[in-house]
Amino acid sequence: MTASQVQTTTATIASAASPQTRRPLVVMDSVSKMFSSGTLALSNMTLTVNGGEFVSLLGPSGCGKSTALRIIAGLGDTSSGTIDWPSSRINSKGLPEGDISFVFQEPTLMPWQTVFGNVYLPLKLRGISKASARNDIMATLATVGLRDFADAYPRELSGGMKMRVSIARALVTKPKLLLMDEPFAALDEITRQKLNDDVLRLWKDTGITVIFVTHSVFESAYLSNRIVVMKARPGRVHADFPLTTSLDRDAHYRTSEEYRQACENVSNMLLEAIGGEEH
């Protein structure tokens, strides 16, 4: 199946009110990244993400997905090209003020702090007192199902619970954009599916924009309303298409023909990208 065929297939199930018609939040324009080692990680990558979208960056390991995410977050510089924020007020570092949160591959929690203390960290860095932050922290913990674990330490939590703490820490500042870098890759399948459901619920409930890095066809087809397939290094966009469904994305959807077809389409597109075909 070619890029144009997959795009036609997915476009036919996209609603007229697709989130892609919303106002652009972040725009990557011809971004390239070469590391000091001489490795060209990204080459002329152009991508626009609109407010309210759930965009998955899908591609093989080493294709530059995480590099692109870190550049958007301001954690790395471009070698060429620009990152623009049309809908945001920009600070002195060229980033939107308080609008971005990042969930890394590992929870990166402070072992000496409680769950409450870990979630409090970004608010503390903003100079907000613990007393003033308490209500927001507890409400955010409730959102991820951890209100009763506020006084627990990371060593007392499962892997899935630690990742929920990391997500709560990212959400407590009420960002416009949530960046997630393969956050569930190291978890067992049951925990991963549960957290996929949790993230989808949070996205729907809050209206937050999500850019989600994954190398899983199944995860991208389940979570996203838009998938960006990247070519192998140097990374750039191979295909960019909407992915909607007439069904609720839940346990029943995972066994539906619609989900199977979506996974097949995305898998074909990924294989095409890895094969290096040009269209």
Image (cartoon, helix red, strand yellow):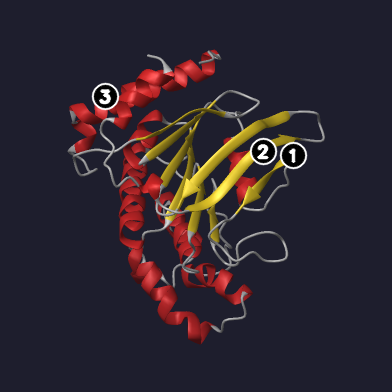
Give how far across and how far down residue 237 sits, in percent: 54, 30
Task: Please state the horizontal and vertical placement of residue 103, each as a whole percent of the image.
Answer: 52, 53
First in residue order: circle 1 vs circle 3: 1
Residue 88 percent coordinates (x, y): 56, 63
- Contact flag, marks 1 and 2 (Cβ < 8 Å): yes
Cα–Cα gap, marks 1 and 3:
38 Å
- Give me the residue at 49% from left, 46% from top: 49
Amino acid type of the residue tagged 1 in the rendering: Ser
Residue 80's disc is 1
SS state under label 3 = helix
| Depicted 279 relative to depicted 100: above or below | above
Q: Position of residue 236 (x, y in %)?
A: 59, 29
Quadrant of the rendering where the N terminus is positioned? top left
Secondary structure of the residue carrying numbered label 2: strand
Label of residue 261 in the image: 3
Task: Using residue 23 as the reference point, say whether residue 278 is left or right of it.
Answer: right
Image vertical order of residue 272 relative to residue 42, above or below: above
Q: For numbered disc 1, what is the local secondary structure?
A: strand
- Name above or below for residue 262 compared with residue 155: above
Q: Residue beneath label 2, please? A: 31
From mark 1 to mark 2, how far is it between C-alphas? 6 Å
> What residue is at 26 percent from the left and 41 percent from the top?
15
Determine whether, in the image, residue 247 is placed left or right of residue 26: left
Q: Tell me the amino acid under the disc marked 3.
A: Gln
The residue shown at (65%, 59%) is 95
| Contact flag, marks 1 and 3 (Cβ < 8 Å) | no
Q: What's the residue at 37%, 42% (across, down)?
A: 192
| Disc 1 residue crowd, few under 14, some 14–19, many 20+, Cα 10 Å | some
Decide which of 237, 218 is in the foreground and name it: 237
Q: In this orientation, which residue lies closer to the viewer: 87 or 148?
A: 87
